[in-house]
Amino acid sequence: MASFDIKDKVAIVGVGHTKFGRSIDRHALDLIAEAMQNALDDCGLRKEDLDGLCSNFGWPASYDVDAMAETLGLNLNWYGQTWTHGRFCASVIQWASFVVHFGLANYVACVIGQGAGPRMVGGAGDIEGRRETGGGHGESPHYGMTSPGAGAALAARRYFHRYGATPEQLAAVPIAFRKHASLNPNAIMRAPITREDYLNSRFVCEPLRLYDYCLVNDGGTCVIVTSADRAKHLKKPPVYIAGMQGIRTGRQEFIFGLPGLGVMQQEEFAYAPKPEQLKIYQTSGLGPKDIGALYTYDAFSFLAWVALERFAFCGPGEAPSFTQGGQIELGGELPMNTNGGLMSEAHMSGWNHQIEIVRQLRGECGERQVKGLEVAMWANAYGDALIYRR
Amino acid sequence: MPEYRKPLPVISALNRPFWEGAKKHELRFQRCNRCSKFWYPHGPVCPYCWSREYEWAKVSGRAKVTSWVVFHQRYFEGFKDEMPYSVAQVELAEGPRFLANLVGVKNEDIYIGMPVEVVFDDVTPEVTLPKFRPA
Ligand SMILES: [Zn+2]
């Protein structure tokens, strides 16, 4: 096993967000400033303490971090930004972790804000999706292939075909997350849905239906990362990062699928991850059995199945049955997205899930608290992951 | 001829021979002179062996559908008369997979493994789109 010197040496100490809503009609930077203030208040730091800033949500949908720093009056020793996609949420936390661990900065705020402004969800206004290389979801606008959901639909079709999975089985994912949202006062969509509601909902990009899709909304979030040494002296108990692995890409990967699914140039085979493809468990010394709650980037319901198989919570083709019978609901064997996820709480690019993990591990989640939670995991369809512990 | 209102492909130095071939109703993909593999997306080197020695070889145009989606939500005004329309992932007999529209088949009759062959749609004087029909 490779040594992983950073294990438990970095922590999340403060989390904050704004109200989440379909259309808040505020500037993105206004939402970011409010979320940052709330995160600072959460851990008892002042804005003068922040010396690092990172985001995965800048131009064209929001503000770039250097402009943020100037406008908000921050003096930074380090900043970083990925291009604008939710899939880089854990990557941002990983960068922030390395930065505080190696001393390039002491306190890194990871922020995003979506306000009134362009959204990159397909069509003529999706300027990234119309590039030569599209937006990374299989865009091919001259054939009408547009929007992230279409890429997920293309992969879901392959999966349904390969394993004989059904839409009735997929319904269990949005139903579970909506049930969790009904216990979350911050969630945008709180009315429970049934299997019939799911099956009667309209197709957006077939085989995916409306309830297979996440929300599109406004809001701001902030998560503050620092070293374990500094974390001990702050207001609330630290939530430590116990393991991580990076986001994957290449010809054997498709953003919304497992290796082996035969999407784009992938080979076709039943993917069962080898130990070296699960660095997250090697680095943390923990395994699926230790995970008390699982969080995943549920831009589309199908991605929950991908994450479960990618991280060996079940075998190839087993995720459809694994997600039945309340197993991924609160009180089940592996509660997933207890906040309601991108599908029902809000689409904050995965940051609302990180905030939920922190609050769950602090025991702050009231009605939806996972009892006695010690270890939680962020596991992405894209292959990146984080393990958090109290 | 009515104005063509759908998005057009972004033609670049990497993919120009593909689009020039399509205009002549020839489907061309890069084939490596060293390892003989065809590849896609178009690129400056063979992604398998990084050889720069390749040719834009004409392919058979025979393919099979390996996945497909049907757009029920309208994202582009130019597609409004074709709703709901399909986009298929086709796998060429020579190996590469890419996305294209199907013609001459109802959405409900599409299936994985369906044999198809290329047809060429001259959508503007400059651009021809390869599409696929049941073979
Ligand atoms: Zn080669």
Image (cartoon, rainbow, N blue to C red):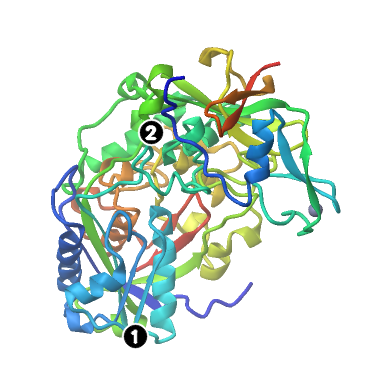
Observer-side mark, 1 or 2, equals: 2
Q: Is mark 1 within 8 Å of ligand 1?
A: no
Left or right position of A144 against A125: right
Q: Residues within 10 Å of mark 1 (few under 14, many from 20)?
A: few
At x 44%, y 37%, the residue is A146
**From the image, which quarter does the C terminus of chain B lie in?**
top right
Amino acid at circle 2: Asp
- Give x and y (percent) for residue A307: 49, 47
Chain at tag 1: A
Closer to the camera in the image, A341 or B36: B36
- Is any part of residue A322 visible from this angle? no
Residue A368 screen position, x and y as percent: 24, 48
Q: Is any atom of residue A52 visible in this view?
A: yes
Q: Residue at the location (58% across, 34% down)?
A: B99
What residue is disc 1 on? Answer: A229
Tell me the residue that label 2 is attached to.
Answer: A212
Assign a secondary structure to mark 1. Answer: helix
Side of B41 where A62 appears, left or right: left
